[in-house]
Image: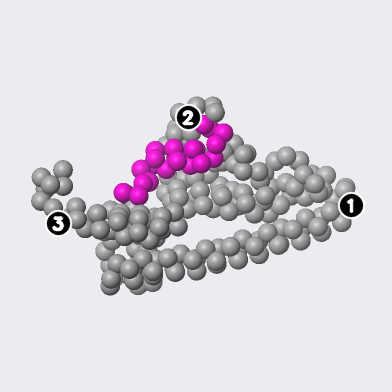
Amino acid sequence: MEPNRIIEWWTETQKVQQQQQMQALQQLLNQLQERQEQAAREPRGAVMGAVAGTPGVDEDSGARLPIRLTKLGPDDDPEAFLVTFERVATAARWPQEHWATLLAPYLSGPAQLAYRGMSARDALCYYKVKEAVLDQLGVTPESHRRRFREARYDPLERPRAVAQRVKEAGMRWLEPENKTGTQVADMVILEQYMRILPTEGQR
């Protein structure tokens, strides 16, 4: 397949995925809004158990929202964990300036060490915390590139699952949502160029 067609295919697939995610988020937000409106109509005594200002609690209505988060475990995919956190935070309408503080109790192991090693100022910025956690756990575009290139077909695995695994590694390596088509093409061309050089030239 030609590089231009590959880029078009990746871009189109990413657009479809983003549309599906936005629709799912919109449905979740609509459900949360309906529940908040319903809780606002209930007597105050029915929601006395709620604690204002805590995650999963709507301060206006005092209603507990259906949000359950778990700690990042050693076998969890850190990127998937952070994406889930971001979607929950968006759906619950938590202010973005509080995301880092809300995320901190759910970190464990090396991720927690990365957070602890940050300055007090940087630890308040969610995106700096995210970057530090992923860096500590060795999650980089280069690690995804290797996973993409080293992917093998397992006869015990469903073909659709294999395709999803390869696609996910490729998308995380190339990050087409943050790059132009030319930049993505440059990454693929550079990688191929590096592969055909002799060892001395690669160094």
User: Which tag is nearer the camera, tag 3 or tag 1?
Assistant: 3
Per the image, label 1 sits on a secondary structure element best described as loop
Magenta span: 122-143
Q: How is the image coloured?
A: one colour
Q: Tell me how far mark 1 sits from mark 2, CA to CA.
A: 45 Å
- Residue 187 location in percent, x, y? 30, 55
**In the rendered image of this protein, does residue 85 appear above or below residue 38?**
above
- Work out whether mark 2 precedes mark 3 in sequence or the reverse, and give the earlier one: 2
- In this figure, which residue is indicated by the disc labeled 1? 43
User: What crowding class fits label 2: few (fewer than 14 Cα within 10 Å), some (14-19), or many (20 or more)?
Assistant: some
Residue pictured at 39% horizontal, 66% vertical: 10
- Depth check, front residue: 5 or 113: 5
- Determine if residue 20 is in view: yes
The quadrant of the image that shows the C terminus is: top left
- Residue 73 location in percent, x, y? 47, 45
User: Which tag is nearer the camera, tag 2 or tag 3?
Assistant: 3
The answer to whether residue 183 is left or right of residue 189 is right
User: What crowding class fits label 3: few (fewer than 14 Cα within 10 Å), some (14-19), or many (20 or more)?
Assistant: few
Residue pictured at 68% horizontal, 54% vertical: 66
**In the rendered image of this protein, does residue 66 appear above or below residue 120?**
below
Q: Tell me how far mark 2 sits from mark 3, CA to CA.
A: 40 Å
- Residue 63 location in percent, x, y? 77, 50
